[in-house]
Structures are given as C-alpha cells and as structure tokens.
Image (tube, rainbow, N blue to C red):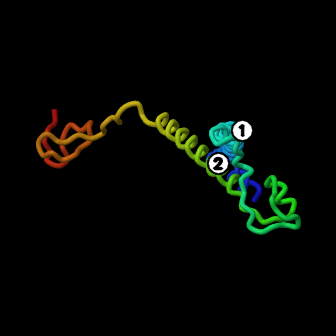
Amino acid sequence: MLKDFREFAVKGNVVDMAVGIIIGAAFTTVVKSVVDDLFMPMLSVPTGGLDFAEKFIVLRSGATPPPYTSLQAAKTAGAVVLSYGRFMNSVVSFLLVSLALFFLVRWTNKLRRADGPATPTTKPCQFCKQVIDIAATRCPHCTSNLA
C-alpha cells in the first residue's frame, strides 16, 4: 500500500498540482497585499481618505450602544455587523488574481503553440481526389501511379 501511495504521489500530475496550489497561495497573498496596501489607499485619496476595509453597517447593536468608531470596536462590543468594505476588498483581490491568472495562462498557451502549421501527413490523389498518405506512390483507391 505504501508503494502504491508513493507511485501516486510522485506522478507528474500530482506534483504539478501541488506546486500550482503552493504558488497560487503565495500569489494570492501578494495580490491581497497589493489591493490592501496599494490600490485601496490610492482609491481612498479621491474619496477623501475613505478606508474601505473599515466600512460596515450595524445590523444589531452590541453590549455597548452605537455609534462605533471602527469595525473592531463594533465587534468587540458584540454588535452584528455587515462588513461590506472588506467584501469590496475581497472582490477587488479576486478580480486582480483572476486577471493575472488569465494573462499567465494566455502567455503559457502562446509558449505551448507550435511555431508554424503542422507538417501535412496526407494529400489528395490527383486522379480520384481521395485522401492518401503523403509518401504514397500508388493510390490505394484508384490504383493510379502518383508522381
């Protein structure tokens, strides 16, 4: 059983998948940092210093009555909140990760494509127009000699 598991674990697809998951997790962390530390602060400049991560709606008050100065204060007070600012950050992160992966897959597919069209392996017979092997000297359909 251990031998079977080892064969399964070292197969190319499993190792490739594991590497892809690890790189994806690291990539997601980088993109989240880009969103939280670069894009959202730049977005807050035209909106007058608005911090989207701290935007929330109180659905039910906690032990301490509102107003709450921050999301953390509301959660500490036990309030039920709808954190739509964090949701917006997550949506932007998702869109950026999706866009980056789209370009990565597109680039990878371009690298995998052949440089030119595939070499033909068949040709039409000049007499009966049936498809035959390119190296054929006699047509198997009409038995004509081919040049």
Residue 115 x/y as whole percent: 41, 30
* Left or right: 8, with 143 as reference point: right
Q: How many discs mark residues in the rendered view? A: 2
Residue 103 in view, yes or no: yes
Give the secondary structure at mark 1: helix
Residue sitting farthest toward the left: 127
* Left or right: 39, with 104 as reference point: right
Is the C terminus in the top left, top right, bottom left or bottom right quadrant? top left
- Residue in front for this viewpoint, 50 or 142: 50
Q: Determine the image quadrant of residue 44.
A: top right
Determine the residue positioned at 80% across, 59% down.
Answer: 67
Residue 119 x/y as whole percent: 33, 34
Q: Determine the image quadrant of residue 134.
A: top left
Q: Residues within 10 Å of mark 2 (few under 14, many from 20)?
A: few
Amino acid type at mark 1: Asp
Sequence-earlier tag: 2 or 1: 2
Q: Determine the image quadrant of residue 96.
A: top right
Q: Which residue is mark 1?
A: 37
- Residue in front for this viewpoint, 107 or 65: 65
Q: Residues within 10 Å of mark 1 (few under 14, many from 20)?
A: few
CA distance for labels 2 and 1: 30 Å
Residue 83 x/y as whole percent: 72, 58
Q: Which mark is residue 97?
A: none
Numbered disc in front, either 2 or 1: 1
Determine the residue positioned at 49% across, 34% down.
Answer: 111
Q: Which residue is mark 2?
A: 17
Amino acid type at mark 2: Met
